[in-house]
Image (spheres, grey):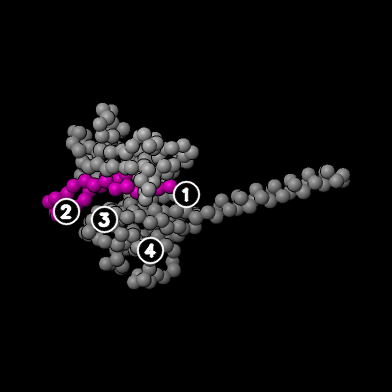
Amino acid sequence: MKPISKLIVVITSIVACISCSKEDGDSSRPTTIKVVNLINGTGNVIVKTGDNPINYATTRARVAFDDFKNFSIPEHSNTRLDIVKETDTINPIYSESLSLKGIHSLYLLGDQDEQQVFFIEDNPRSFTDSIMGVRFINLSKVSGAIAVNIAGEVNPLLIGLDLESATDYMEFPVRESDGVYLFEFRDVSGNLLSNITIDPLERRNRSIKHNLSLVVYDQVLSPVSTFQRVSRINNY
């Protein structure tokens, strides 16, 4: 074999090995689950992954109310995910064996007496320009279908978003000249339910080239008093 032919064979073999390594790495990437705690009046929840025992008194796997935290499980591996209230580690809020791939969010809702779970796959977008991606999620049982608009604009961004439904990530420019966004959430009659201001260039919570979710849900003050609240959940 001529020297140049040998060189081609060697290069081909190296490329093939690199390709195999990349594929092997992709297949072993962990699945990410973002646990979001929106349960009224329960305080912290504790998240346990897998079958290994956990010390509930010292674990850092806590998620405070109106907060979120990422957890990883092996991809396509039937891994147990258990979530309990810090005040009741015997009766789980959520307990499932999951075999997943990719990025997901798990929303915990309800109150001390009854909890609900909303599970959704995240498909975050990649941005190279001064853009942010915003996804709207309706988890308000009281409101019914909702509409969302930007304050001061005539045309709504969306209408008829049903309970336990989510939009795709919608693009919004985030140049300095664009300023802040005041998103208003309304019921089908046009009544204002809640609103939230997003400053994409805020230093501590920058949104440029990132994705976030705005979630409307019910905040229970008392058995006869409920209002709607919007929480911002940072994605990727």
The residue shown at (29%, 62%) is 44
**Residues at marks 2 and 3, CA–CA distance in whole angstroms:** 12 Å
Mark 4 residue crowding within 10 angstroms, few (<14) / some (14–19) / many (20+): some
> Residue 144 in the image: x percent, y percent?
23, 40
Q: Upstream in the sequence, badge 3 or badge 1?
A: 3
| Residue picked out by circle 3 | 39
Q: Is residue 150 left or right of residue 96?
A: left
| Residue picked out by circle 4 | 61
Q: Picture quarter containing residue 33?
A: bottom left
Q: Amino acid at mark 1?
A: Gly
Q: Upstream in the sequence, badge 4 or badge 1?
A: 4
| Residue picked out by circle 2 | 221
Which range of residues does the magenta coloring cover? 214-236
Q: Upstream in the sequence, badge 2 or badge 4?
A: 4
> Residue 97 in the image: x percent, y percent?
42, 58
Residue 220 colored in magenta in the image: yes
Asked if residue 175 can be seen in this view, the reply is: yes
| Residue picked out by circle 1 | 102
